[in-house]
Amino acid sequence: MSETRNKGAVVKTAHQDLHSEQGALRGEHPGRSRNPVIKVADLAWLEFEKPDLDRAEVFARDFGFQVAARTERELWLRGTFAGSPCMVIRQGRTSRFIGPVFRASEQADLERLARATGTDVRDADVPGGGKTVGLLDPSGFPVRVVHCGEQLPELPEQQPLLLNFGTDHRRTNATQRPPREPSRIQRLGHVVLETRVFGRALDWYLDTLGMIVSDFLFLDGQRDRGPTMAFIRCDQGSVPADHHTLAMHLGPGTGYVHSAYQVTDLDAIAVGGEYLKERGYKRSWGIGRHIQGSQLFDYWRDPDHFMLEHFADGDLFSCDVEPGWAPMSTSGLAQWGPPATRDFLGASPSPQRVRDVVQALRGDNEMDPARLFGLLKAANS
């Protein structure tokens, strides 16, 4: 057990200093619901619309996806692991993110969720069939929960390189020559969203989908107002789950920030990055290693300016690890790597960003001048 001092009193927590410098103070958000409706098992896939599916497929293959199914109106992308697809891109007039789709452990969870939310269980439009419940989160994102009828089969893997460590020589009379090829995506890892109603959205995901918080971030000098970012994982009990399947942060806008896809190892990240660079794609930030989640990372922009991440070697937590608490700062994003870019931080001014700020400060949400100033300070710290 670790100790946290709160106004002279020592509060025992179960934080154990595993993943940030401090645990919760007395009375702070517990990071989980007492009685959630269901507990989702994982992200299933993400849904997008784009006007040019051919261009989307070219980038997808260069980034390391494989095509699970393709029609005139839909492109289903997958990784090498068995299970569900990673992403569906549907034909649309503009490029936009629709929302996340989570996987239910069993079909009975869909019935329970539908009863609790006043919705219906419907057929899922996924290769292989299945059932789904459609919801709307407090930010306005369509959120679906699915139980798929069939799993996609496993595909050949990109094998990790055999490495020598100190006096542990596993590779002799052989050279390292990783082929210059796309990083082979294994699976969808997480999605990051921005919201003006962070507190309401956080509680909704915990209460409705049974997710639990791994780490909270707060603004400097404003911890008493509560967190402004949460890294949220699926509750798989004693089975360790990704440090975060969903991350959300308070901001002046409402929308997609990035999504992350697991690859084999650091060499797969680096060689895949060289492959993307040679084909003219824009790196947003990387390569480095995060603090919250510990992932090796590399961020890229697709032709429609959506940000996608290659990652490897992320943290896995079981349900008994309680939330860590840390101040929000740009320097706190990585243990090592190049400085975070303005592109990654979304700090480059644009007419849309100005409109978002004005609208947020006028609207009924959790943004106010103090919060906005705190976010700007964090981005420059």
Image (cartoon, grey):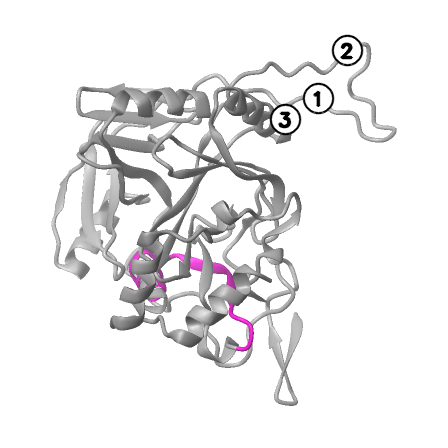
Mark seen at residue 173: none
Report the Cα–Cα distance between label 1 and label 2: 10 Å
Identify the residue at image location x=44%, y=27%: 81
Q: Element under label 1?
A: loop
Most extreme residue toward the right is 167
> In front of the other: label 3 or label 2?
3
Where is residue 53? Give x, y as percent.
26, 24
Report crowding for label 2: few under 14, some 14 to 19, many 20 or more residues within 10 A (C-alpha): few
Name the quadrant containing residue 248: bottom left
Report the Cα–Cα distance between label 3 and label 1: 11 Å
Task: Answer whether labels 1 and 2 touch (C-beta < 8 Å).
Answer: yes
Mark 1 vs 2, N-terminal side: 1
Task: Answer whether labels 3 and 2 touch (C-beta < 8 Å).
Answer: no
- Above or below residue 353? Residue 171 is above
Give the labeled residue for mark 2.
174
Mark 3 vs 1, N-terminal side: 1
- Residue in front for this viewpoint, 322 or 268: 268
Where is residue 175? Give x, y as percent.
75, 12
Q: Is residue 213 magenta?
A: yes
Q: Element under label 3?
A: helix
- Residue in front for this viewpoint, 174 or 357: 357
Give the labeled residue for mark 3.
267
Name the amino acid, label 2. Answer: Ala
Name the amino acid, label 1. Answer: Leu
Identify the residue at image location x=37%, y=56%: 194
| Left or right: 136 in relation to 179 | left
- Above or below residue 288? Residue 350 is below
- The magenta segment is 202-221
| Left or right: 314 in relation to 62 | right
Identify the residue at image location x=53%, y=67%: 377
